[in-house]
Image (cartoon, rainbow, N blue to C red):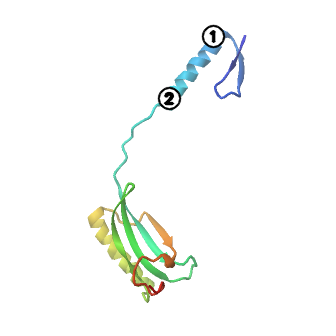
Amino acid sequence: MISFVLPDGFTLITATASAARKLRINQKRARKRIETKHQIPVPQVNYGVLQVWRESREDSPIHAVGVEIWEQNNKIAMVAPVHCAGWLPSQVHEYLRQALTVLDTEYGFKKFASQVLINPEQCPIRPCFLCQQ
């Protein structure tokens, strides 16, 4: 019988010499399996991120909307933000529906992948009635 300490430094096994040898061989095989990197092709997908400038209160009106179009980690296009002051919710929905129709023809997606809520004070549109600039 011999004592064998595993690479994790915590486990102590008492075994025969042949069992310890088998254990070492199996550990080497396991490390090789873990270290093997597989190259799996990543699909090239275009997706849209809806940007909504609005206060975080649930009842607050939408200040502005815009869209960014991404391919993997690269921003490839955008729909410029527009102020929604005075728009009814149905008008905002109609505008976004029309934007999705155009984006579907150009980039091939039918809905937004995510929605980002941004504080209206960070509105990029100038002049902006909220920022008074």
* Crowd tier of the residue under label 2, counting other residues whose Cα lies within 10 Å: few below 14, some 14–19, many 20 or above: few
Q: Amino acid at mark 2?
A: Arg
Indicate the secondary structure of the residue bearing disc 1: helix
- Numbered tag placed on residue 81 in the rendering: none
**Left or right: where 50 falls relative to 27:** left
**Residue 114 in picture, x, y percent from top left:** 45, 65
Which residue lies under the disc numbered 2?
33
Which quadrant would the N terminus be assigned to in this image?
top right
* Residue at 38% from the left image edge and 70% from the top image edge: 67
**Residue 62 in picture, x, y percent from top left:** 48, 81
The answer to which image quadrant residue 106 occupies is bottom left
Q: Earlier in the sequence, mark 1 or mark 2?
A: 1
The total number of labels drawn is 2
101 is higher (above) or lower (below) than 14: below
Which quadrant would the C terminus be assigned to in this image?
bottom left
* Crowd tier of the residue under label 1, counting other residues whose Cα lies within 10 Å: few below 14, some 14–19, many 20 or above: few
Q: Amino acid at mark 1?
A: Ser
**Left or right: where 36 falls relative to 68:** right
**Residue 96 in picture, x, y percent from top left:** 38, 75
**Left or right: where 56 falls relative to 3:** left
* Residue at 34% from the left image edge and 72% from the top image edge: 79
5 is higher (above) or lower (below) than 76: above
The answer to which image quadrant residue 58 occupies is bottom right
Indicate the secondary structure of the residue bearing disc 2: helix
The answer to which image quadrant residue 126 occupies is bottom left
